[in-house]
Image (spheres, coloured by chain):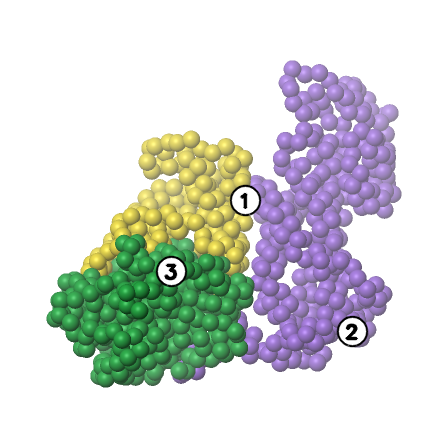
Chain colours: A yellow, B purple, C green
Amino acid sequence: MGQFIDGPLWAFSLGVFVLGVIWRVVTILIAGNRSDLATAKGSAGKGAIRAVFSRFIPERTVTSRGRIQLIAGYLFHLGLLALLFFAKPHVDFIAERITGLSWSAMPHWAFIVSAEAAFIGLILLWLHRVLNPVTRLLSDLDDHVGSILVFLVMLTGCLALAQSFEPLRLIHLLLAELLLIYFPFSKLMHAFTFVMSRGYTGATMGRKGINA
Amino acid sequence: MARSITLQIDNRNKQHAGWLLLLLLCLFVQPFDTFAKASESRGIPSAVVLNPAAEIWRDVRQREQLTNGTSQVKGVDSGVLINAYGDQWRNFRMQQLIPIGGFLLIGVVIALALFYLFRGKVAIEGGESDKKLLRYTNYEQLIHWFIASIFLFLAISGLIILFGRPVLIPIIGKEVFSIIASACKEGHNLMGPLFLVALILIFIKFVRRNIYQKGDLSWLLRGGGIIGKKHVPSNFFNMGEKTMFWMLVLVGSVVIISGFVLIFPIFGQGREWMELAHVGHAIGAILMISVIIGHIYIGTIGMEGAIEGMKTGYCDLNWAKEHHDLWATKAEQQGEAISNDKVSQLREVSSAQPLGGHVQEE
Amino acid sequence: MSEKFEQGVQALRQQIDARISAYFSSCVHCGLCAEACLFYTETNNPRFTPIHKLEPMKKLWRREYTFWGKLAAAFGLGQSLTEDDFAEWETLVYDSCTLCGRCSMVCPVGNDITYMIRKQREGFSVAGYAPDGMKEATRRALKIGSPMGVTYKTLKAALAHVEKDTGMTIPVDKQGADYMTLFSSMEIVNFPEYIESIARIFDATGVSWTISSKAFEATNSGIQIGNKEAAAEIVNRVVIAAEKLGVKYVISPECGHAYTAIRWEGPNLIGRKYPFEVIHILELLDQLKKEGRLQLEYKDSIPMTLHDPCQIVRRGGVVKQPRDLLNSVAEHFTEMKDHGVMNWCCGGGGGVSANERAEPLRLQVFNRKKRQLDELGINTMVTACANCRITLEEGLEHNEMDAEVISLTELIADHLVKDESKV
C-alpha cells in the first residue's frame, strides 16, 4: 500500500494533474474569441498584463463590504503558497521527485506563521461560504469538495510534522494525490484560469482605455 | 516522601511560581489532599531503603530543592542534573489529573443525560411565531463557528493526548496510538495559536453584550428558569451566558498563555515552569470542556430554537421573548421583528420570486 | 419543449467563447460581485448576486463543456437547461441588471460578469423571455426607427423649434460634412435643449456638422434586450447613412448605451470596420476645448457633482474628459465617494428604464444614489446620459429630494463666450 502511494499512484496523479490542466487550458483557448473590430483607444496587451496584476489590489467596495473574504482570502492563498513551495519537506520532495532543482526552504518560524495563516484563512472562507446567504446560494458540491480536500491535505501535512511516522506521511501524500487528480476537473482550476480571465477582461478594457 | 501536595506547591511558590497558576492549582488540588496522603503513605518508608544506589541518586537529586550546577553547555536548565519536581509532576498527572479529570468529564455528561431524562427538551411554549428577530450578524456567526471548530479540534486532540494511555492504548494498542499521539501533538501545537486569534475576535465582538447588568442577579437567583416552569426575563445574554463568556475569556487566557509556554521554549522558561504551565493548561482545559459540553447540550438537544440564531442569524420571536425577554421586547418595540417570509427571502431558503414575472419551483 | 426555446438554447450556446469558458472556470463563488451590485446592496436579496443571474448559462456550460457535466449527461444524470430556467431567471437577467459593469471591476479572478449577462440576454431574447417593454421598444426601433416611436417628423419639429429660438439653420443631410450627429429618442422627446446646445456649440466652434434624416437615432434597443440581429440592423442604418453622407466622424450623443452600441459593439455586430470614426460628444467637446476652439467664460459658483454614466465612463473609457469639462465651468466640483469607473449606477440602464414592471425595484435601488448625494450634501448633479438623467429625476422626485440634474453638454453651451459680432 505504502509503495503504491509512494510510487505508481504518485506518478499517475501527477500525470493526471499536468495533462488535465493543459487539456483544460487548451479547451478554453480553442473555444476562441472573435477579434474586436472596433478601433482601439488603448493597447489590449498592456491592458491584459495590467489587469493580471492590478486585480491583486482590491477596490474599495471589496475592502469595505468584503473585508472578511479579502483578509481570509489573502491569508489562505499566501499561506498556502508559502507552504507549498517553501516548506522544508516540500522543497526536498520537489527536488527529489519532480524537478531535481532545489531552493532554500523557509525557516521553521515562517513555516508556522504560514500554516497558521493558511488555516485561519481557509476555515474562515469555508465558514463564510456556508453562513453567508450569497455564497451559500452560489456554492455547489465542487466548492465544498475542493475546500475540504485542500483542508484535509493541509491538516494531514501538519499532523505529519514530526516526520517520524511513515503512515502519517503516506496519508498526507495520498490526500495530496487525490487533490492533484481532482484538480483539473474542478473549480481549483482557477489557480490557472484566473490569469486568462483577468487577461481577457483586461484586454477588452485596455482597448477601451480603461484601467480594469 | 510523605509530603502533602500543598506543601510542595508552597515550595514551588517560593522559587518560581506565577500567582495565577498557583491559585488554580490550589483550588483544584486542595480537596484531594487526604486522598493523596493516603495513597502515598502506603509506600515504603525512606529509612528502610537498603539499596546504597538510592543514596547516591538522592544526593544527585539534591532532595527537595533544585540546585543549579555549572555546565559548559549554555542553556536553560543545563545546570540541572535531575529535576527534583519532575517526579511529582508525573505523579500529579497520572494519579490526580487523569482520573479526576476523566471522572469530572464523564460526570458532566451523565448529569446532563439525567437532566434531559428529567426535564426533556425545553420547548418554545408559545410555539414558533411567524416573526423572527435578527440575533447574530453574519460576522458574529462566522467567528462563533470559527472558535467552535478550533475548540473542538483542540479539545479532541488534547483529550487524546491526556487520556490516550488509559483509554486508547488498551483498545488500539501502542503501535497505532503512537501514530495518533504524534499526529495529535503536532496538530494541537499548530492549531493552538489559532484559538488565541479566535478568542480575540470573539472578545472584541461580544464583550459589550456580556457586561453584567441589572436583572442578571435575579435571573441567577431564580435558577435561570431551569428549575420550575416559569421564564425569567433576561437581556441579550443571560447571566449564565455571560458567566460562560467570562469563564472562556479568563480560563481561556490561562490555557492560551500556558499553551504558549509549553510550545514555544523561547521565553527562557525551564522545566518547572513548563510543568506548572502543563498543570494550568490541563485543569483550565478540562474546566472549559465541561462548560462547553453544557453549552453544546443546550444548543442541540437541550432547547428548542436555541441554535437557530447561530445557524441562520435569526431567532424565533416567541423563543426570544421566553428566553431573552428584555432584549426581545425592546427589539420588537423598535420594529425589528421580521416576518418569516422576509427572512426566507433574505436567506434565500425558499424559491420565492424576487419580483413580478413567472417563477417556477427550483 | 417549444421550438423557440430550442432556438434560445442554441443562441445561448453560440455565445460561449473562450472568454466565457475562462470566466466560468475561474469563478470560485466568492460572492464579492454581490457587494458591488446595487441591486444586492440595496435589497440584501442574495438572488441579485451578479454571477447568480448567470445560472442558466452556467448550467448549459457545465452540461456541455465540463468533464462532470458531460459524464453525467452520458449516464442520463444531471440537469440540463429547461424552459423553466428561462422563465425563472427572466426577471433577474432583465429587471435586476443594468449592465453597469461594477461587478466586473471587483471580481478577484477578473471575470467580466456584465459581458456574460449581455451575452446571456441573447439566448433569453431569442427564446422569447424578455420584458414586454423592451420587446416593444425593440420592435418599434426596427419598424419605426426609434424605440420611443420618434420619427423624422418629430425630430424635424424639434429642429424647427431650435431654429426659431436661435435663428440658426441646422444642417440636415449635408453631404461632405465632417461630423454626423446622432440623438437618442430621450433627448428628442424629453430634452430638446440638448439639440439646441450642440447646435450653438458647433456654431460657435465652427464645426462642420450635419444630421441625417435617415439615421438620427442612437439608442440601440437591440443591445439592451440582447438581440444581435436587431442591434446590427440598428447600427447598420447609421453606418449606411454616414457612408452616404461621406462624413469623417459620427458623434455619439450623451446617451450611455448608444455609445457602447455604436462605438464598441457596432463594428463587431455588422462584421466590418467603419470607414469613419465614432466619437462621443464629450470627447469632441474636450478636444475642441484643448484645441482652443471652444471658448468658455466664467465659472458657476454653485457646488456641483458628477454622475458618471456607466456606459460612457466605466464601460466606455471616457473618464477624464467629463471631469476636465466640468472643472472648466464649475468652481466647486466635488466628486462623489465612489466615482469614475467605480461610480454607482442610476439604476435605469441596460433597458431597465424601459421595463415597466421593474419600476418598484428601480426606485428601491435608487437609494444608493440618494445616499451618495446625501453624503455629499450637493444638490446639483451633472451627468452626460439622457437615460441616467430621466432615471435620476424620477428617483429624486420619488424621494422628494430637492436636487437638480443637468446635462454636461448643456452646461457647456451655457458657458460659451458670447460672440459680440453676432449680437
The answer to whether residue B113 is left or right of residue A211 is right
Residues at marks 2 and 1 on the same chain: no
- Callout in the foreground (1, 3): 3
A120 vs C416, left or right, is: right
Left or right: where A42 falls relative to C354: left
Closer to the camera in the image, C79 or C312:
C312
Q: Residue at x 44, y 37 (%)?
A: A86
Chain bearing mark 1:
A
User: Do we see residue C118 in this rendering?
Assistant: no
Q: Nearer the viewer, residue C53 or A187?
A: C53
| Percent coordinates x, y for residue A108 in the rendering | 52, 34
Residue C20 horizontal side relative to residue B49, left or right: left
Task: State the image coordinates of residue B112 (x, y, percent, origin top left).
Answer: 73, 63
Q: CA distance from mark 2 to mark 1?
A: 44 Å
The residue where tag 2 is placed is: B231
Residue on which disc 1 sits: A116
As helix, strand or loop, the secondary structure at mark 2 comes to: loop
Give the Cα distance between marks 2 and 3.
76 Å
Amino acid type at image mark 1: Glu
Mark 2 or mark 3, which is nearer to you?
3
- Type of residue at label 3? Glu
Is residue B169 or residue C23 the one in the foreground?
C23
Which chain is indicated by disc 2? B
- Binning the other alpha carbons within 10 Å of mark 2 as few (below 14), some (14 to 19) or many (20 upward) gives some
Give x and y (percent) for residue C278: 23, 63
